[in-house]
Image (tube, grey):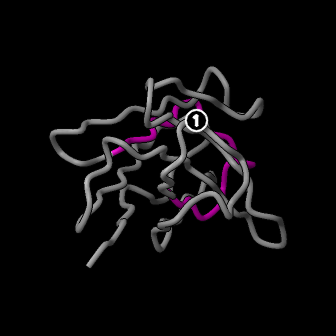
Amino acid sequence: QWQLVESGGGLVQPGGSLRLSCVASGFTLDSYTIHWFRQAPGKEREGVSCVSGTDGQTRYANSVNGRFTVSRDNAKNTVYLQMNTLRPEDTAVYYCAAGQIPFCSGVRSDYDYWGQGTQVTVSS
């Protein structure tokens, strides 16, 4: 049975760092495009960062560009989101999603598999 599991969330002070992991089971991630989304209370789910399944190109939302880095380790069937210089406005539930699409898309329905989410809270 396929599954995506996120981990690595938690409480961190502003300026701190976290690394989120997205591990797949039941299928291999290496050919999938993986997108990290987040949803803050009362807000729409938004795309944060994406890595393409075809050429490994990455994309970032303007709000996180230069602070977040997405990477994949196909041997571990895992995608990571390194988050540095965190801000209170980064507080949200973070989800990873996998889609059999060649390039990054911000359309949620393009992604076939979703994890359950991991909470990130940035607060002093």
Find numbered disc 1 in the image and state the secondary structure of the residue it sits on. loop
Q: Would residue 50 be counted in the magenta stretch?
A: no
Give whichever of 102, 46 is nearer the camera: 102
Reading the image, the residue beneath label 1 is: 103
Q: Nearer the viewer, residue 54 or 119?
A: 54
- Which segment did they paint magenta? 79-96
Query: Horizontal and vertical percent for residue 59?
Result: 62, 29
* Number of marks in picture: 1
User: On screen, 77 above or below 44?
Assistant: above
Residue 39, percent from left and from top: 70, 63
Which is nearer the eye, 107 or 39?
107
Where in the figure is residue 14, as x and y percent of width and height? 62, 41
Height in image: 44 above or below 8?
below
Q: Is residue 86 magenta?
A: yes
The furthest residue to the left: 75
Q: Amino acid at mark 1?
A: Phe
Q: Eyeballing the image, is 55 above or below 74? A: above
* Image coordinates for residue 62, horizontal then vertical, percent: 77, 29
Q: Residue at x 51, y 58 (%)?
A: 97
Q: Tell me what residue is drawn at x 62 percent, y 20 percent.
A: 66
Q: Badge 1: how crowded within 10 Å, few (<14), some, or many (20+)? A: some
Quarter of the rendering containing residue 38: bottom right
